[in-house]
Image (cartoon, helix red, strand yellow):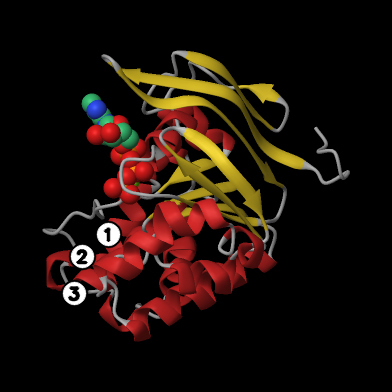
Amino acid sequence: MESDDGSRVILRAVDVVKKFDELLALNKLSIDVFEGEILGLVGPNGAGKTTFINVVCGLLRPDGGHIYFRGQNIVGRKVFELARKGIIKTFQIPKVFGNISVLENLVSSASWMGFSVEELRRQAYESLRLVNLEEKQGLLASQLSGGERKLLEFARAMMLKPKLLLLDEPFAGVNPVLKNRLIQALKKVNSEGLSILIVSHDMSEIRKLCGRIVFMTAGSKLVEGPPEDVLRNQEVVNLYLGVKRNAAG
Ligand SMILES: Nc1ncnc2c1ncn2[C@@H]1O[C@H](COP(=O)(O)OP(=O)(O)OP(=O)(O)O)[C@@H](O)[C@H]1O
Ligand SMILES: [Mg+2]
């Protein structure tokens, strides 16, 4: 599948609709994610960003529209089927198991994928190294800080060998040092070919990572393009950045 400019498209969502009773959470939303890019998905609270991720990864079934992954229609596929195809998401609130070790969290997350025990261990160490958590491997996950849990959640996602990684607010509640570690890890896996869709309210991190962003509001796309263009767009400033600035005083 190709976009207008000839880039290869890994994910194409066309006119996706998702309703919660009367509420149109996604209102004919169309988004392309290009092979090998980091696409930022931004917009105000309640815009439908998490809903979009949940529809793409199979947690929610859309009420209309089409979603293609590598050219194949994936609407109606279950989460585990899509995970096997390489669509992996992380949660806005990390879902780690507090009562088992950091290492066991990694191994158990991928145990259903059919990898050998050696492969699982090898991958677990690789994922730990990626986020510099090697020294914490024996701790219970509950002993990690909130930020470290976010890193662990990312490492768990990497265990599943994603082709398209969907990140929901990976920087929320993460201190600057760990944030930077996560940014370096994301840049590394992206440079190795991983396509990433990242939802974040953290515009400075979005600017550092994304070549392109989509700004959505009320379930629809408002504008897309390079971050510097989108974030200067007057409607975006009025709808979002202006509000944030006011909120900040
Ligand atoms: N399971 C649900 N049932 C009913 N309404 C829902 C459900 N999930 C989301 N919504 C509503 O759908 C809209 C979009 O929500 P969503 O969580 O996708 O927004 P968001 O862009 O991720 O916001 P935030 O930036 O606050 O995380 C909101 O109005 C929300 O209240
Ligand atoms: Mg959300």
Residues at discs 2 and 1 in contact (Cβ within 8 Å): yes
Eye-nearest disc, 3 or 2: 3
**Distance of mark 3 from mark 2, alpha carbons?**
14 Å
Amino acid type shown at disc 3: Ser
Q: Is residue 230 above or below residue 5?
A: below
Residue 42 image offset from top left, x and y in percent: 47, 52
Q: Nearer the viewer, residue 56 or 158?
A: 56
Disc 1: CA contacts within 10 A as few (<14), some (14-19) or many (>=20): some
Number of numbered tags placed on the structure image: 3
Q: Position of residue 70 (x, y in %)?
A: 70, 33
Quadrant of the picture in which ligand 1 is shown: top left
For marks 3 and 2, the one nearer the N-term is: 2
* Residue holding disc 3: 145
Residue 145 horizontal/vertical position (percent):
18, 74
Left/right of residue 169 with respect to residue 36 in the rendered view: left
Report how far apart the C-alphas of labels 1 and 3 lie in the structure.
Answer: 17 Å
Provide the residue designation for mark 2.
101
Contact (CB < 8 A) between labels 3 and 2?
A: no
**Where residue 1 appears, x then y in whole percent?**
80, 32
Circle on res. 95? none
Q: Residues within 10 Å of mark 2 (few under 14, many from 20)?
A: some
Distance from the alpha carbon under mark 2 to that under mark 1 = 5 Å
Which label sits in the foreground, 1 or 3?
3
Horizontally, residue 136 falls left or right of residue 78, namely left
Q: What numbered label is drawn on residue 104?
A: 1
Q: Nearer the viewer, residue 226 or 185?
A: 226
Q: Is mark 1 within 8 Å of ligand 2?
A: no
**Element assignment for label 3:** loop
SS assignment at label 1: helix
The residue positioned 51% from the left and 31% from the top of the image is 82
* Residue 119 visible to an observer of this rendering: no
Q: Amino acid at mark 1?
A: Glu
